[in-house]
Every structure is written in structure tokens, then in C-alpha cells.
Image: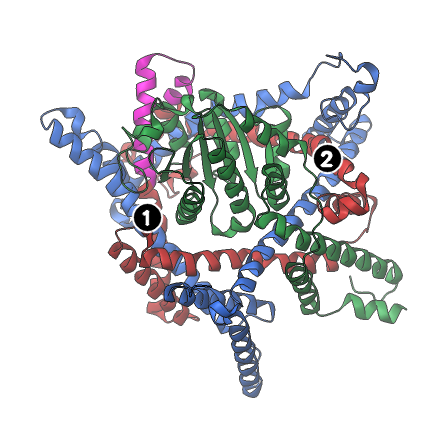
Amino acid sequence: MPALPTEAVLGAWVATGLTLFIYSFLYKDNPLFKLSEHLYVGVSIGYSVVLAWHTIFLRLLWEPLAQAVRDAPSEAGSYMLLLPASIGLLMLTRFVPRIAWLSRLAFAFVVGFGSGVAIPRTVSAAILKQIEDTVQSLAPTGTGGYSAFMDLALPQSGINAIILLIGVVSVLFYFFFSVEHTGPGRVAARTGVYFLMLAFGAAFGYTVMSRMSLLIGRFRDLITFSGAEYGYATLILLLVTVLSLAGWELAVRRKGGKA
Amino acid sequence: MKAFARRMVAIDRRIIFLLIAAAVLVPLLRPFGLPIKVSPEVRAVYDYMETLPERSVFLLSFDFDPSSKPELEPQAVALLRHAFRKNLRVIVMTHWLTGTGLADDVVSTVAAEMGKQRGTDYVFLGWAPGAYALVIAMGQDLYTAFPSDYRKIPTKDMAVLEGVRSLRDVNYLISLAAGNPGIEMWYVFGKDKYRFEMAGGSTGVMAPGLYPFLRSGQINGLIGGLQGAAEYETLIGLTGTATAGMDAQSATHFVIILLVVLCNMFYFVLRGDPGRSR
Amino acid sequence: MIFFKRHLPLAITFVMGITFALQYYVPHPVSEAAITAVSKWMQIISGFALLLGIASLFHMHAVKIRRQAAGWGYSLVLYGAMLGTMVVGFGSHGETKVDGAQTAFGWLYDYTMVPLQGTMFSVLAFFVASAAYRAFRARSREASVLLLSAVIVMVGRVPLGQVLLPWAWDVTQWLMNVINSAVRRAILIGVSMGSVALSVKIILGKERSYLGGGKDA
């Protein structure tokens, strides 16, 4: 097998070390974890700043503006991008207490636009379309007849449409606190609770699946980096981490305090 | 029995951590390889991709960052392999700033393996800010939203984008999402007005919340989590990272079930006991 | 002065909100050109908003270092990592790859950011297991229903479960497609109605928290 480039091996050692330092939190909050946690935040911010600069200020603002001015310097339209740039700069006045009120103009622009575009789209996509699918006709379409109507395995069957309708209405009723949940209302609310419990249980199952997948992904990398081509990075750094934690624990106990 | 139950309920959680670590590690080192059953919602995505003619425009949005890489990267790889195999024109982008490098890595690697050319067969537009505003901008005029791609090459005359003016010209869009901005945003601000077909790929945490959109046909398929990725790999005949991870997934689920069953057993033993651990 | 500090921002919000709510229903070329232009502007403005967030983080940790508050050494590490990444990133012109070869910026991304971010969130897996053991008890009928549903889904969504209990897969599909859909739909409708109501309140000036508070808001 051809030798890996030095930067790849070095990178594997750095990645493995940082991974194990984060996992050291499972023992106890400790300096190794805190170090890698702050490193993570620092690198993320640095990466974001670099990419934001190149994408927003160069690619979206400076280059199109410079091109437009070069092509048609006397046309007013060429300078149009100065308007959003000015609004953006107004936002930054938030840091200067005496003129911080100017940032309100920028936020008003952004929030007004966001609220305006959201209303019709949310009503159409998240409310009307959802209600439309809930109140379906129970008349059987296509072949299948009664057995297709009663087929629980078929998501679009009649029986499932009825269950869905009951579920949506009862859960909506459960969250409607302006009316007291007594009598028939109590039956509706209790039905809603059981629907909620079934759904949250399913959500928990999916959450477990998701979190375990993340762990599986990291362990795969650790297994890869434990190979000879990477200089047994995982095994050596695991030993280093364990010994460091042991040393730190001893030092803390000798001091007589808790970590 | 009660004393044992009391001790077990108060067990150091680090023992549970070791159990989980073992449940992940052992199947990864010694896989047992079980068949993957394909769900209708994943098959729907595959079937729709299969109906797309050559040179159709397929947009894949990497709406995740490295924290969701283990779940969504296998989905991305499988979808890209399928799209390149079908000779579709692939447009890749991301709404998540910190996921940009990851998206570039994935698309470059898969494209190189499949012998595809940047600019002719695919383009990586990179990241742009705005979330919903970006979707609207793309829906109105793609070149206003992305005047150049991630490599700073102007998008206007790219062969892969020939005839693509806006999102209305996209034949199929899949958003691989770990949160917001993601699938719901693409639908509400994108498909609702610009009328392209779309599907979603999501983390396991997000997947249950997307079923209402699946049921109403607002998205035509859903690939949920690592299991969903493994199902898609099965459909395209690939033994990838998702399939390899399913044994560990099985083991960890059964360990969790065992822990829950034990916890309840001890709870029922100690119920009514004044000294029980709450 | 109160006009510029309160009334003008509220007027801007109102005009922008009404204009772009109605724009959705107006297919005229002028209307389409307006939304094209403004959505482009919003991309640039949101870039400045990102700068705002980053600047706040800068400030927070700078204060910690200046006051030598508890853990200020770690804030120094954060600053060092941030500046180091920025130097490397600007030196690489923001590119992670050049002609197929990885740059120093790309190396930093692949071998520090990706593993750090991935590992941070994977730690939750251990805590989910620990929490499930300690707290997931069938204390009541409702809790039992939740528990049963969770166990069925955990069995039904993995290959081993599908082999041992084939019916678990079918029940999981039904739970997700019908029961879960119903509940999530109800929550989606409720939340969407709430967000539309909030948007209307913002446009009409009843909700002013976005102005940042103070006696002039």
C-alpha cells in the first residue's frame, strides 16, 4: 500500500487527538475537553469569517458592483448594490450606543420583508395544503373496494384517513386552552394525549437512531486512524488521553478539591 | 432483590457509556451483515430519479454541517452516484456555511470517481447567505443569486446550466437537511411558487416532522437517517458506509431497549419502597 | 427625534410587509422585478447580520480576557484558534482546494473542524442511553404508551429487529405514516398559524421586540 502524504497522517493524529479529548468529557469535565471545545468554537468562527468575506463581500457585492460600474459608469442602476450595503452598514451601528437607533431602520427593512414574504407562503404550504390532505374523500378510488379501505398497511386507505383526521383534530383540541377540557372536550383531549404519546415515542426512537449514527460515524474514523498507515494514531492517543486524565485526577485529589 | 435493584438503579453512568461504546465498536470490527429492507418513502425517491431523462437538471442542496456528516454524507454519496450514473446535470449548493467544505469534498470525490467534469456535468455553487431570501432569489433568477460558483467561475455561460434560468427549470430537487434552513424552507419558499418536484433527506431527528409533507405529496419521498441512506445504497447496488454501519445501529438499539427494560424492571421492584431512587 | 427612532422603523416594517405579502399574488413584471432585486439585497444584508453575530462573540470573549474572568485562558485559546484560522484562510484566498490539491485552509477544515463538530454532537449518544436508563419509566398509562411506541420503532427501524420481529417494521411504518403524521400535522398547523399571527403583529407594529427595546421602542 502506498504511503500516505505527511499532511494526511498529521491530520489524522490531530483529528484523533481532538476527538478523544472531546470524549474525555464522558469521564468528567476536564481541561482537555475545555481546550478542544474552545478550539472548536475558534476554528468555526475563523472559518465562517473567511468564507463570509469571500462570498458576501467579494462575490456578491464587490465583483458585481465593480463590473456594473466598469460597464456603465454613468448609469444610476450600476450603483444599485450600494443600497443593500448601506442598509447592512446601518445594522453595524448597533455597536455604537449614540447612533445605535439607526440599526432599527435596517432591522425594520429585514423584518418587514421577512414577515411579508412568510405570510402567504406559510398559509399556502403549511396550513391550507395540510388541511386539504387531512379532509380527504372516503369514497374508494381505483380497484380494491372495502379491503383497500380497511387496509392499515396502505397509508392512503380510508381507515387511515379517518384515524388521521381524528388524530389531527384531537391534538389541535388538546392544545386549545381557551376552552375547558370537560365532557366531550375531555374525551377529545385525552385522545389527543394518546396520539401525542405514540408520536413522541416514535420520535424518541428516531432520535436514538440519529444519535447512534453520529457515534458510529466517529468510531469508524477512529478505527480507520488506528491502522499502521496512520501510525496507530488512535491507540497511542487513547493511551495518552487516559494517562493525562489519570494524572490530572491525581493532581486534583492531591490538591484536595473537586475538578 | 430490592437491594440489588437499588444498586442497579444508582449504577455509575460511565458503565452505560462503556456498554454503548462496546455496542458500536464490536459490530464495526466484526460485522454480521443483515439484509436491508427498503421503505416506500425511500423507494419513491429512487423511482422518480429513474424516470428522469438524461441531462435533466438535478439540484442537491447540502443543508447540513459536519455534525450531521455520518447520517447525511452517505445519502449524498448515494444520490450523487445515482444522478451521475443517469447522466443528469447536477447542481450542488449549500445553505449551511460550515458545511461548504464538506459539500465540495463529497461532490468532487464522487464526480472524479464517476468520470464527470466540473462545468459540463456538474457545478458546485457553494454557499450563499439569505436562507429563504436565497431560495426566492434562485426562484427568480439563478445567476443573480449565484453570479459565480465556488471556484469563482462565472455561472452565466456554463454548459451544465444551459437553459436553466431559475428554479422553475430544475427537474428534481433534493434537500439533505439537518435542521433549518432545510426541507420545509425549500418547500414553503421554493416549490410552492416555482413548482419543481422535490424530495427530502434528513437526519433521524428531523424525519418524523417531515411526514406530514410526505403524506400530502408536498415532497415525493423521504430518506431518513442512516437507515434511509442504507436503503438507498441497497437500491443502487452500493455497499457503502451506511450499509456498513447498520450492524452497529442494530446492536445499539437493542442495548438501549435492554437498558429501558431493565430500568422498568427495577422500577417495578422498587415501586412503593420508601427508599427507592426516583 | 422620536419619529426617526420609532415611527420611521415601524413605517418601514409596515410598507415592506404589506408590499411583499401582496407581491405573492401579483404576477406583473414590475412585481417580479421587485422581489428579484430585494431578495438579492437581503442576501447581502444578511451577510452584515452574520458579521454582527460574529462581532458579538469577539466582544464577549475579549471582555472575559480583559477581566481575567474564570476560564479566561480558554478564551485566549479561542481567540488564537480564530485568528490562526483567519490568517490561514485569507492566505489561501478562502479556497479549500486549488487544482485538486488541498490547501492549508482545507487541511484545517478537514482535520480540525469536521472531527470537532462531529464529535461534539456524537457525545449526545451516550447521554441519550444514560437518560433512557435512568428516566424512561412506565410511571403511568401515557408513559407506557410512549415507551411501547419507542421500543417498537427502535426494533422496526434496524435490520436485526426486522429479522427478529418482522411485524415491527409494518407497525413502525403505520405509526410514522398515520399516527406521527397526524400529530406533526396538528403541531405544524398550530405553529404556522402562530407564526402568521406574529408576522401580522410585526407588520402592524404591535410586536416591536425586533427594535431592540429601550424607552423609544
Shade of chain B as shown in the rendered figure: green
* On screen, residue C92 above or below B5: above
Res. A196 image quadrant: top right
Disc 1: which chain? A
For the residue marked with disc 2, what is the amino acid? Gln
Count of picture labels: 2
Inspect the magenta stretch and tell me whether residue A169 lies in it: no
The residue tagged 2 is: C173
User: What is the C-alpha distance between the residues marked 2 and 1?
Assistant: 42 Å
Residue toward you, C141 or B106:
B106
Query: Furthest residue to the bottom?
Result: A254
Residue toward you, A176 or C73:
C73
Is the C-beta separation of discs 2 and 1 under 8 Å? no
Q: Quadrant of the N terminus of chain B?
A: bottom right
Most common secondary structure along the magenta stretch: helix
Shade of chain A as shown in the rendered figure: blue
Q: Which region shows up in magenta?
A: C18-46
Give residue A51's mark: 1
Q: Residue at x 10, y 28 (%)?
A: A73
Q: Quadrant of the C terminus of chain B?
A: bottom right
Q: Which chain is red?
A: C
Residue toward you, A84 or B158:
B158
Query: Furthest residue to the right?
Result: B1
Res. A170 image quadrant: top right
